[in-house]
Amino acid sequence: MKQQVPSRRDLMKGAVAAGAAFGAFTILGATAKGQGKSLKVGLIGCGGRGRGALAQHLQAAKILNDKLNLGLDMKVVATADWFKDRAVATGKKHGVPDDACFGGADAYKKLIAAGPDIVLMAQAPCFRPPHFEAAVAAGKHCFIEKPIAVDPPGCRRVLAAGKAAEAKNLVVVAGTNMRHEKAAIDTHQAVTVEAALGKIVAGRAFFCIGHMFAKQPIKPQTADDLVRTWQSWIELSGDHLVEQHVHNIDMVTWFLGRPAVSAGGFGGRARRPAGNMFDFFSLDLDYGDGVFVHSMCRQVNGCWNSVGQELTCEKGTTKCTDGLKPQKSPVPDDLPCDLDGKPIPGHLQEHVNLLYHLAKGKPLNQTQDVAWATAITVMGRIAAYTGKRVTWAEMMVDPKKSPEIYDLTLKPTADDFEKGAVEVPDEGDIPAPGGATAPRPPRKGARKGRK
Amino acid sequence: MKAKDLSRHDFMKGATAAGAAFGAFTILGATAKGQGKTYKVGLIGCGGRGRGALAGSFEAAKIVGVEVKCVALADYFKDRAEQSGKKYGVPPERCFGGPKCYEGLLATDVEIVLMAQAPLFRSVHLEAAVKAGKHCFVEKPVAVDPPGCRRVIAAGEEAKKKGVVIVAGTEMRHEHPFRLTHQAIAVEGALGRLVAGRVAFCIAHMFHRAPINPKTADDLVRSWQDWTALSGDHIVEQHVHNIDIANWFAGHPPLSAAGFGGRARRNAGDMFDFHSIDYDYGDGVHIHSMCRQVNGCWNWVGHDLVYEKGRTNGRDRETPAKSPIPADLPKAPSSSQQEQVDVLYCVGKGEPLDEARAVAESSATAVLGRIATYTGKLIRWNEMMTDPKKNPDLYNLTLKPTAEDFEKGTVEIPKEGVVPIPGVA
C-alpha cells in the first residue's frame, strides 16, 4: 500500500478559521512513514446516535493510523446537547472539561466557537439545517446525520449551505451509512455508471419493522419534553418516513442519479400510541423517464417486516448492496474497507471516508445527496398526509406554483426552540388525507314518481 | 355487421331441460344470413348494475342478431324484482324475492342468468346456476373470501363439463383493444418479458356518507357496498378490475401480497377507504396496486405495465400478429354491451367461455391484498388458495355473515365503524 502525505490544506484552513481556543492543535512529530496531524472534534447531539458517531469517528482515525500510518491525533474539544447534563456526561468520557460541554438551544453556537475542525451532528433532525449552516459558515468539516431537515425550506437551506461548503472545500459526509460501504459503491459503479444491467426500469424500497420509541402517550408540557422524545414528533423528526426510510430512498435516488419528480401515496396511524406521527406509508414515487418506485415503511408490531431496496433493471435486479463487481472500482486502492477480514460496516466506514478525504485533501461533499433523499421523503410525507400528488417542482424549485408546499414549515421550528416560542403540538392529532365526506347535496329533481 | 348462423346446441339443451312453461319460445323466421333465435334471460340482483346488464343484454342481442326475452327476475327485495319486471313484462309470479330468490329463478325455464347481486351471494348463486345447467353472466367480484373464490373455481370446472358458458363482468377483458393488446404483448411477447407494474383505482368517496346504523339483514343488503362481508371491501369490489388486468397480463395470480391500508374518511360501514399493496408475481416481478375512495386526493384509474422493451396501459397496442378475436364476433360500442355480446355469441356457438377461474383468481388476488392490509402480514397465495394444511385459518377464512346466514336468517349485524387494525398493539 502506498503511503501518501495527506494534504493539510483543509485542515489548516479549518484551524485558522476557528482559531485555537483550546490550544489542542498539536502537530505530532513526523512518524517514520508520515506526518502526524491533530484534529479537533466537536459533537452536537449527545444521544445514542451521537455518542455512537463520536466513538466510530475516533475508531476510524485509529484504523487509518493503523493501516495508512496517517498519525491522526484526534481530540474531542467540545460537546453540545439540548440537555447540558448529556453534553457533560459525554464530555467526561472523552476528557472534555465541563466548561466545553454546552447545553441549551444555542449550545451549537458555543460548540462551533470552541474551535473544532470537525463537527459531528446528531441532534434532532429539525435542528440540523441551522446547525449545519452555522458550522459551514464557520468553516467546519461536517458529519451530518440523516435526515438533514424536516420540511422543504429546511431541505433548501441545507442545499444552499452545501454549496457554500463546496466553495470552501469543506468535507461533508452524511449519515446515510449504506452508501459508504464498498459493496454499495462498487454496485453503484457497476449498475449506474457502467450500466451492467442495462437501464433501471422500476424499483421498490422498504423499511418495515416493529414499533419504535414511546409506547405510551408522552403528554409533553414543555419544549424539553418534546426534544427528549423527538423521535415521536413530526416537527422534530420529520416522521419515520423521513427519519428512517430516508436510508432506502437515498440508495434508490443515488442509483437513479436524480430526485423523484413526484410522489403520490398512502399512510396512516394504526397502532402508535404516542406523539403525532403516522406509523405506515406506502408511496408511488415517480422518478421520471418511466421509472416508478414503490416506497414502503412501517413501524408496527406483528406485521410483515423487511428492510432494503430492489431495483429492476433491463437485465436483472439489484439490491444495491450486493457487491456487483465493476470493471473499475471508484474506491481508492488505499482506503481501508476491511477490518479483521470483514467489510467495515457503514456507520464506521462513513467516518473512515470522512477522515481519509480530509487527511488526503480530497473533496467529498454529500450535502446534495442527503438533501435530495430527505426532500423526497418529505415530498412523500406531504403526499400521504394530504392524499395529493406532490411534485418536486412545486416543493423545491418553483416558489410560485404551490407556495403552501414550497414554504411549508413545520411548527415549532428550530427558531422557535431558540427563541423559547415553542407551542407543544397536540398528541395524537394526526393528519387526515383528503377532504371530509360531506353530506350528499340535495338532488335536483325529485326521484319520486320518476318512471 | 353479419347476422350469424348461431349454433342452437346449448340453447336447445337449456330449453329442453327447463321446459317451455311460458310458451315464450318464439323461433323467428330465418334472416338472410342466419337464423333468428330468442334466448330466455333472467336477472338476479335488480340494482343499478343488474338493470344495466339486462339492458346491455338486449342491446347485445340486436348487435348479434338474436332476440332475448326476460323471463324471470330475482332480488333480495321482491319489490325491486317486480319493479324491473314491470319494465320487461315479467309477471309478478316470476319475480322472486328474499334470500332464496335465486332458487325460484333457477327453477324456471331461464337459459341465461345474469348475476349482479351483492358479491357475497355470487359464489352460492353461481354454483346453483351451473348445477341447474344455466349459462351465466356473473358480475365481478365473484366472492369475498377464500372459500368463496374456490367455490367459483369449482363451479367453473363443473360448467366446463356441462358445456355451460360463464362470462364474467371483468369488462376490460372483453374490450377489443384490451384483447388485441394482451395478445400482442402477453401472448406474442412484443415487448419482451413483464418486469414490473402499477395498477390503480383511486377515486373519490363512494356510497353512504353518514353512518347506516343497520338493524336488520335487509339494512345490510340495501347498503351492501359499505360492508366488507357483503362487498369484500372496495379493493375487492372495485379495484378487482385492475388486478384482473395485472393477472391477465402476468398470466397467473401473484405468489404473495404485503400491504398497507386504512380508513381515513369513510364514516359508514366497516370497510377501509385506501389500500396500497406490493404484489409479488414471482421471478422478480412486483406490481404496486393502489386503490382509494377518498375525496380531494390524487385520483388515477389505470394500468402501467413495464416490459423489457416498453410499457403498456393494457389497451394501447392493438396490432398482434394474429388476432385472438373470432372474425365473426361482433364489436359492441361499449364494454358493458360487449360482455353481453360475448355471452350471446358463446351460447350461440356452443363454445363455452369459461371465465370462472380467471375472475375467481382475480377476486382472490384482491382478497389476498385485503387480508394483507387488514393484518399487516405478508399473505401467500398457496396458503390462502391451494394448500389447506399450511395455514388453515387463512385457507378457511370465512367472512360473517355468510350467504347461508342470510338464507337461514342467522345474520349478526357487523359493528359499524369498527375496522381492522393491522399488526398488534
Image (cartoon, grey):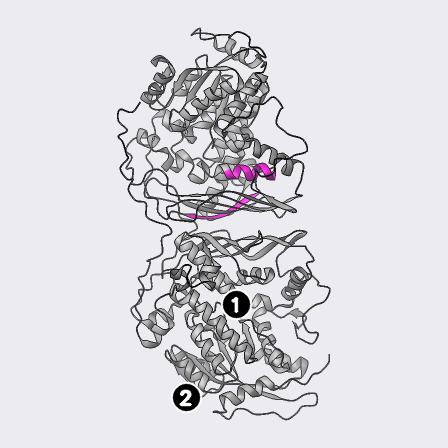
Q: Report x, y in % for residue A154.
A: 43, 69
Image: B215 above or below B81: below
Report which quarter residue A347 is drawn in.
bottom right
Q: Which chain hosts label 2?
A: A
SS assignment at label 2: helix
**A247 relative position to A277: left or right:** right
User: At numbered mark 1, what does the secondary structure look like: helix, strand or loop?
Assistant: helix
Task: Check if mark 2 and mark 1 are on a common chain.
Answer: yes
Q: Chain of mark 1?
A: A
Q: Position of residue B121 (x, y in %)?
A: 42, 28
Q: Is residue B244 magenta?
A: yes
Q: Residues within 10 Å of mark 1 (few under 14, many from 20)?
A: many
Left or right: residue B401 compared with residue B188: left
Q: Identify the residue at image location x=63%, y=23%.
A: B327
Q: Specify the amino acid type for callout 2.
A: Asp
User: Is residue A244 part of the magenta span, yes or no?
Assistant: no
- Residue at 49 percent of width and 91 percent of height: A19
Closer to the observer: label 2 or label 1?
1
What percent of the width, then of the height, locates residue B296?
37, 48
Q: Residue at x 45, y 82 (%)?
A: A79
Residue holding disc 2? A99
Identify the image quadrant of the N terminus of chain B.
top right
Q: Is residue B354 above or below residue A359?
A: above
The residue to which callout 1 is attached is A370
Closer to us: A396 or B251? A396
The residue nearer to you, when weighing B191 against A124, is: B191
Q: Which residues are magenta?
A: B242-267
- Per the model, the C-alpha gap separating discs 2 and 1 is 33 Å
Q: Which amino acid type is marked by label 1?
A: Val
Ranked by sequence position, the earlier of labels 2 and 1 is 2
Considering depth in this image, is B376 or A451 the residue closer to the camera? A451
Q: Residue at x 59, y 79 (%)?
A: A355
